[in-house]
Image (cartoon, grey):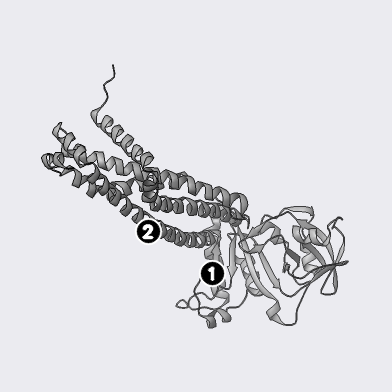
Amino acid sequence: MIRRSPVLLAMREAVSMGLGAIRAYKLRAGLTILGVVMGIMTVIGMSSVVAGLNATMAKQIEGLGASVVFVRPHNPGENLPDEERRKRKGITEREVKAVVERCTACLAISPMELLFGNTIKYGNETIRDAQMFGTSEAYAVVHDIYMAKGRFFSDVDVSRGARVVVVGADVADTLFPYIDPLDKEVQIDGRRFTVVGVMEKKGKFLWMNRDNFIAVPKGSVQRKDERFNFIVADVKPLSPAHIELAVEQVREIMRRERKLRFWQGDNFGVFTQDTLTNLYRSITGGIYMVMIAISSIGLVVGGVGVMNIMLVTVTERTREIGVRKALGAKRRDIRWQFLTEAMTLTGVGGLLGIAAGGAIAWIVNAFSPFPAVLQPFWVIVGFSTAVAVGLVFGMWPALKASRLDPIEALRYE
């Protein structure tokens, strides 16, 4: 015959008494643990949404191309004065050529000439909000481009400034909803370009639709005003192992080309996908801090409610405590009995909060554009925190119960 531990039996009895109190006083127990439920629901719901956004963002950043080095006027998240930000210039042709010639860790560099205010037309269809840029044949190599139809333009197209165009999936669907777009002539600001390719669907990156764009050979669309020919560049290292060396070499080349002294800071930005990932994680880290602050308020309110109800319970069961002590129960037995009941109460609140948070995550994932992924880590943290609230706020009532004089307790009416 298996002999059960007295401690486990006492805990089982205390848990049963706690659950019995919840069943007997449903409204009182519900109001008591409401703060705990709200706090844990906030943790589970918000952590699920943030985890889903993190996974989506990581996938979108990977979609920019494997191990890409970005050369821009400034780094993402860089806090610059307005005057300094206005002074930052785009990358010049001379700087791009210098990187191509002297960066030994670079496989390819793709300059991108950002073109604004263009309209593209085919028949009765017109698109005015598509992002348009001129680039080289290296763009397909740098960004691991795959074509849904046709081809990307070649080095011959770029050297000749040929009037050919590669369009994104959304542009193709809008201009050519029922026909094959290849070899069709479109008008860009009144000039005719031939569609030679359609890129595979890429999806969105933050607020930017990467399927709503038009790519032309760099130099095929020129503007007299240089402000409309703003150039940035993306660089492909020889391999992922060369990415740090590529960043160092590109940065050194840019500093030499811009004749910066050793004491002068960079007036450009060279960064990688990890920079974008870390910036996004710092933002979501702030969201986590807000989540913890909000949930802490609910947990403190719930903990105070638990302490209050347990003090009432001690008063209601004073005679019972006296009987238990008269029969040989020690102070620690009484203390653990009430602590276990308090932890049972908040533990139930934690389970309800987890269920409510999981329901919110499912609703957000199913009926909104934001993804949500339930995290087992936060489920464990949520339940453990709820139980810990019962332990902390149940301590004073438990101590008060354990210190009752058995004779006075037996006389209590």
Q: Which mark is residue 75?
A: 1
Residue 41 left/right relative to 226: left
130, 388: nearer the viewer: 388
Looking at the picture, does residue 341 appear above or below residue 188? Answer: above
Q: Which label sits on residue 297?
A: 2
Does residue 83 appear left or right of residue 234 in this picture? left
Q: Is residue 380 visible?
A: no
Query: In the displayed structure, does residue 404 sit left or right of residue 11?
Result: left
Mark 2 vs 1: CB contact within 8 A: no
- Looking at the image, residue 192 lies above or below residue 318: below
Point 56% across, 59% down: residue: 273
Front residue of 297/128: it is 297
Image x and y of residue 223, in percent: 75, 79
Circle 2: residue type:
Ile
Report the front residue among 408 and 194: 408
Residue 243 seen from this side: yes
Considering only order in the chain, which callout, 1 or 2, is on the residue closer to the N terminus? 1
